[in-house]
């Protein structure tokens, strides 16, 4: 257990959280926030540990944000374990947990949203209309409530990270946005709260995402730079897997997320794949290792 200086608190009211944050800032303390939707796994915990090392006060937020789910998505069944999450967060050295109710974040009559234009259009933006508007809105609200100097996100949600970094710059949030590497299971599956949905055969099938990324990386390392060839290599293991169905597999500039036809600068190979009814995402950046 990492020693932390504040008493551990679980806060549910936005006004209480904000008052805490304002006092901590007044005391000259550096605040880090790690936003999550809970059901914490080692991927989340890696962000918390990184935050613990970078700030005086570590805040974890747990909120399953309804505005980032589409009407036919998994909001109602999204896995939750608040008690377990609080214990895990405390063990990682979190000082304050902010876990508001939906009504506290979106009271009756709520009508304000944040949109990041270009970065939220492709990939998950076109596959999940409205998703990134919901993400940008809730992250903005969480930033205003927790008043962080630094915020930590996982690169597993690569487009989300890129969009939040852009938003923070564009809107002068003055918050350092840090992206951490993807944490994987021993066999390569990217850790995700949604992995809990997978049956045993689906869990095996889900490895096709990692196999696809590895196949494309191998082609890239052997000198292939053509997007179509790299995408073919990524798609093959997925298409060969009976329980898997591609939502998208795409290769885009790692900064702008514009399409690339050939990799001459770092590019992100990003994919979303349905395994049974569960939609999984994964990615790898080509050209920076
Ligand atoms: P979520 O609870 O899924 O909204 O995720 C909260 C944060 O944890 C986001 O910044 C995610 O990118 C990050 N995260 C989720 N899974 C992983 C993982 N396997 N490795 C690294 N970061 C992750």
Image (cartoon, grey):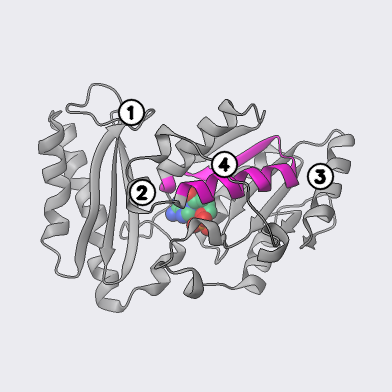
**In-image side of 45 versus 148 (left or right):** left
Name the disc covering residue 288, or none.
1
Q: Nearer the viewer, mark 2 or mark 4?
A: 4
Name the disc covering residue 279, or none.
none
Which circle's residue, 2 or 3, is located before the other in the chain? Answer: 3
Q: Secondary structure at mark 3?
A: helix
State if disc 1 and disc 3 touch (CB < 8 Å): no
- In the image, is residue 40 above or below residue 121? below
Q: Secondary structure at mark 2?
A: helix
Residue 68 can be seen in this image:
yes
> Can residue 137 be found in the magenta stretch?
yes
Q: Nearer the viewer, mark 2 or mark 3?
A: 2
CA gap between label 1 and label 2 equals 23 Å
Q: Of 45 and 234, which appears nearest the observer?
A: 234
Q: Secondary structure at mark 4?
A: loop
Which circle's residue, 3 or 4, is located before the other in the chain? Answer: 3
Tell me which segment is drawn in magenta.
Answer: 132-157
Q: Of 35 and 173, which appears nearest the observer?
A: 173
Name the disc covering residue 21, or none.
3
Residue at numbered disc 2: 124
Q: Ligand 1 closer than 8 Å to the CB at disc 2?
A: no
The image quarter containing residue 40 is: bottom right
CA gap between label 3 and label 4 equals 23 Å
**Picture residue at 84% right of the left edge, 37% below the top:** 25
């Amino acid at each position: 257990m990492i020693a932390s200086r504040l008493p551990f608190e679980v806060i549910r009211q936005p006004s209480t959280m904000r008052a805490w944050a304002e006092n901590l800032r007044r005391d000259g303390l550096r605040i880090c926030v790690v936003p999550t939707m809970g059901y914490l796994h080692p991927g989340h915990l890696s962000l918390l540990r990184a935050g613990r090392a970078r700030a005086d006060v570590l805040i974890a937020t747990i909120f399953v944000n309804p505005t980032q789910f589409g009407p036919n998505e998994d909001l109602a069944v999204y896995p939750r374990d608040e008690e377990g999450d609080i214990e895990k967060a405390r063990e990682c050295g979190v000082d304050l947990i902010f876990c508001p109710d939906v009504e506290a974040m979106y009271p009756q009559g709520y009508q304000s949203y944040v949109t990041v234009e270009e970065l939220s259009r492709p990939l998950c933006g076109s596959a999940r209309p409205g998703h990134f508007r919901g993400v940008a809105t809730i992250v903005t609200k969480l930033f205003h409530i927790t008043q962080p100097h630094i915020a930590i996100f996982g690169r597993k949600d690569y487009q989300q990270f890129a969009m939040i970094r852009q938003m923070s710059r564009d809107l002068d949030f003055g918050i350092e946005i840090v992206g951490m590497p993807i944490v994987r299971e021993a066999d390569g599956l990217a850790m995700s709260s949604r992995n809990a949905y997978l049956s045993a055969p689906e869990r095996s099938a889900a490895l096709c995402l990692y196999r696809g990324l590895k196949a494309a990386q191998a082609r890239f390392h052997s000198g292939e730079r053509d997007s179509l060839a790299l995408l073919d290599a990524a798609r093959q293991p997925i298409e060969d897997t009976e329980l898997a169905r591609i939502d998208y597999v795409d290769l885009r500039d790692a900064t702008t997320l514009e399409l690339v036809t050939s990799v001459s600068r770092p590019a992100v190979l990003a994919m979303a794949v349905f395994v049974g009814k569960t939609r999984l995402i994964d990615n790898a950046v080509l050209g920076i290792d």
